[in-house]
Image: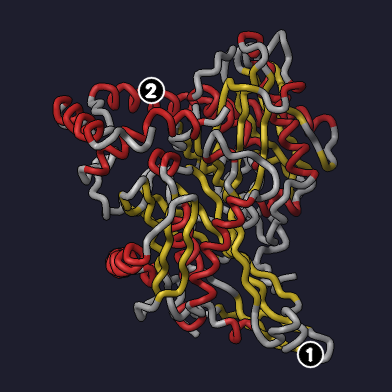
């Protein structure tokens, strides 16, 4: 239970001027910023800021499967973990993953797996950890979009990128990319992901009410938006490769080289005279 | 398979040899912290939030609150808890699931200085004694684990608290425990009194150094963490790992920790992250 901060949002989500609460046109996306290679420990990682969403994705693997019986002898397995931090939403979320997080993890896994060449990694697991730091509607689409970038960064072979976005319906009008407020009070929500190598839909969910004509138009809106986001993904990846190349050019090992080798040998000799290295 | 075991056997000696000549594998002095970068207000939905980078270590902390019953032994005091999540995203050897003993120790190490120094004025967090108080959650998530989560976690917890905007309430009906937002927020300068700074040393053999990085943390024998409040009093101490320390060592490290902590406190100036100055 927390204090009810008075909701200042107006009854209508679309104003007289046809603009949405945050000033967007009906077919306008929120601002999207992506960065690849943000978690040094991970084999691949990416970060996305999509409106008020802030999400990290990290890939570990291909690596050993635990528990062993989950392993498949003919191919690698993909595991995705969609998790939200306790403070990412207005009412504190319980720390343990809930039903919603588990379902979304599965939906994202099913969206991504068709583009990966997992048959190249028998007996191994590719694990994608997605952590929602700040949530503001459409997290599953943002997560799918950022997870694939982390997989590229990890060098997992794939047929192509995938991109996801949601269409929705508020005040009887079709909109693209629902914000948190629009998600809550909207009439319909249609998240959708595309696999670009063959233009197939690999994530599709719907809840709310729409007639079939609206449904067709929503899918058109989605296709238009997906193209834009796809370009941003490619730019983020190109920037990563340019950074990697530049870093390699100026590469200096982080480890301080033992200033000269003779000195090191001397040190060891001294130790040996004193009765050997105690760490052995 | 454990990454740490491989490192222990191959890198420990190299690191130790360098340490004995006052050299760190990342080029630092023995008593030098890595660069610290702090961002606040990064999560819209959280009352307070902070992202702290300590070298390659990254932690993000959020502050949330609820209203609920107090503990029976402190009927007129608010409640606060620290939780730490070592999520598998942040390092290959962390596993999912409920917090393990390591995460719990970390949470308690971040909690203890705040509690001992009476940082949070929890008598301000009581609405109706015995019935209704604020419960503050300080949740620390590791984003990239590269050593010394204790000090970085403590800094992020304090920054998130300092920058928090916790709404204040007024009682509508005391009997029915009805209340509503009075339109204001707690001034954290009044809600928080003392910002204790933690300083963690690692120890390999008989060499002690501050702010261990990931490799050092994996090969070191143990650590010792001191925390000092604004007035220079010791508020928390914990020896971790298998290393042992002599009495003299503990005394001299305490002074070293105080010196380093004072410098950190001055350099970081955590009060600058305050959002609201009213009330």
Secondary structure at numbered mark 1: strand
Circle 2: is it few (<14), some (14-19), or many (20+) Cα within 10 Å?
some
**As drawn, B189 above or below A46:** below
Q: Which residue sits at x=58%, y=39%?
A: B94
- For the residues labelled 2 and 1, the Cα–Cα distance comes to 62 Å
Residue B264 can be seen, yes or no: no
In the visual, does A274 lie left or right of B153? left
User: In the image, what residue occupies the spot 23% across and 49% down?
Assistant: B29
Task: Please report contact status of discs 2 and 1: CB closer than 8 Å, yes or no.
Answer: no
Of residue B255 and residue B166, the one placed in the foreground of this image is: B255
Q: Label 2, secondary structure: give it.
A: helix
| Label 1: chain letter | B
Q: Position of residue A181 (x, y in %)?
A: 68, 54
Quarter residue A268 falls in: top left
Name the residue tied to disc 2. A241
Mark 1 crowd level (few <14, some 14–19, many ≥20, 10 Å Cα): few
Q: Chain of mark 2?
A: A
Q: Nearer the viewer, residue B222 or B273?
A: B222
In the rendered image, residue A169, in percent from the top left (x then y), is placed at 74, 43
Q: Against A123, is A185 above or below?
A: below
Q: Residue A245, position in %: x, y?
A: 31, 21
Quarter placement of the N terminus of chain A: bottom right
The image shows residue B179 at horizontal and vertical percentages of 74, 83
Horizontal arrangement in the rendering, residue A173 relative to residue A232 (left or right)? right
Residue at 40 percent across and 50 percent down: it is B53
Residue B173: which disc?
1
Hey, which quadrant is residue B12 in on the image? top left
Instruction: State whether residue B101 appears in this view.
Output: yes
């Amino acid at each position: 239970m927390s204090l009810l901060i008075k909701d200042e949002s107006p009854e209508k989500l679309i104003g007289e001027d046809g603009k949405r609460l945050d000033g967007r046109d009906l077919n306008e996306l929120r601002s999207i910023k992506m960065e690849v290679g943000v978690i040094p420990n991970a084999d691949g990682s990416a970060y996305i800021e999509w409106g008020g969403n802030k999400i990290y994705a990290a890939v570990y693997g291909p690596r050993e499967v635990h528990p062993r019986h989950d392993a498949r002898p003919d191919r690698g397995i993909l595991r995705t973990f969609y998790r939200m931090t306790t403070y990412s939403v207005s009412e504190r979320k319980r720390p343990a993953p809930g039903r919603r997080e588990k379902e979304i993890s599965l939906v994202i896994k099913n969206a991504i797996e068709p583009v990966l060449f997992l048959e190249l990694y028998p007996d191994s697991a590719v694990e994608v950890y997605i952590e929602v730091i700040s949530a503001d509607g459409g997290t599953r689409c943002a997560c799918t979009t950022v997870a694939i970038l982390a997989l590229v960064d990890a060098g997992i072979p794939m047929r192509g990128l995938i991109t996801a976005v949601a269409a929705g319906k508020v005040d009887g009008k079709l909109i693209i990319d629902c914000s948190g407020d629009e998600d809550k009070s909207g009439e319909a929500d249609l998240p959708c992901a595309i696999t670009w190598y063959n233009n197939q839909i690999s994530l599709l969910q719907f809840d709310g009410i729409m007639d079939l004509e609206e449904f067709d138009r929503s899918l058109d809106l989605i296709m238009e938006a997906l193209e834009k986001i796809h370009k941003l993904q490619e730019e983020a990846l190109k920037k990563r490769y340019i950074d990697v190349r530049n870093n390699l050019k100026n590469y200096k090992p982080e480890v301080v080289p033992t200033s000269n080798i003779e000195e090191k040998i001397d040190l060891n000799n001294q130790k040996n005279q004193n009765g050997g290295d105690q760490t052995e | 398979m454990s990454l740490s075991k491989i490192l222990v056997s191959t890198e420990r000696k190299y690191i130790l040899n360098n340490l004995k000549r006052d050299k760190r594998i990342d080029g630092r002095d023995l008593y030098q912290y890595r660069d610290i970068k702090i961002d606040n207000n990064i999560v819209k939905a959280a009352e307070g939030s902070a992202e702290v980078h300590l070298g390659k270590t990254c932690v993000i902390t959020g502050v949330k609150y609820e209203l609920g019953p107090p503990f029976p032994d402190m009927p007129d005091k608010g409640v606060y808890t620290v939780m730490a999540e070592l999520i598998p995203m942040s390092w290959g050897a962390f596993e999912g699931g409920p917090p393990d003993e390591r995460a719990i120790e970390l949470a308690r190490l971040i909690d203890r200085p705040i509690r001992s120094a009476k940082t949070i004025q929890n008598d301000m967090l009581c609405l109706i004694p015995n019935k209704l108080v604020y419960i503050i959650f300080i949740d620390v998530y590791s984003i990239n684990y590269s050593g010394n989560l204790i000090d970085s976690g403590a800094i992020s917890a304090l920054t998130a608290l300092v920058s928090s905007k916790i709404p204040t309430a007024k009682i509508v009906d005391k009997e029915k425990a009805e209340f509503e937002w009075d339109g204001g927020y707690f001034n954290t300068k009044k809600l928080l009194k003392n910002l204790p700074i933690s300083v963690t040393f690692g120890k390999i053999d008989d060499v002690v150094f501050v702010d261990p990085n990931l490799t050092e943390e994996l090969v070191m024998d143990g650590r010792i963490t001191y925390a000092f409040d604004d007035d220079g009093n010791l508020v928390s101490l914990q020896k971790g790992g298998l290393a042992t320390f002599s009495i003299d060592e503990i005394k001299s490290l305490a002074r070293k920790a105080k010196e380093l902590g004072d410098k950190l406190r001055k350099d970081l100036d955590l009060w600058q992250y305050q959002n609201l100055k009213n009330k």
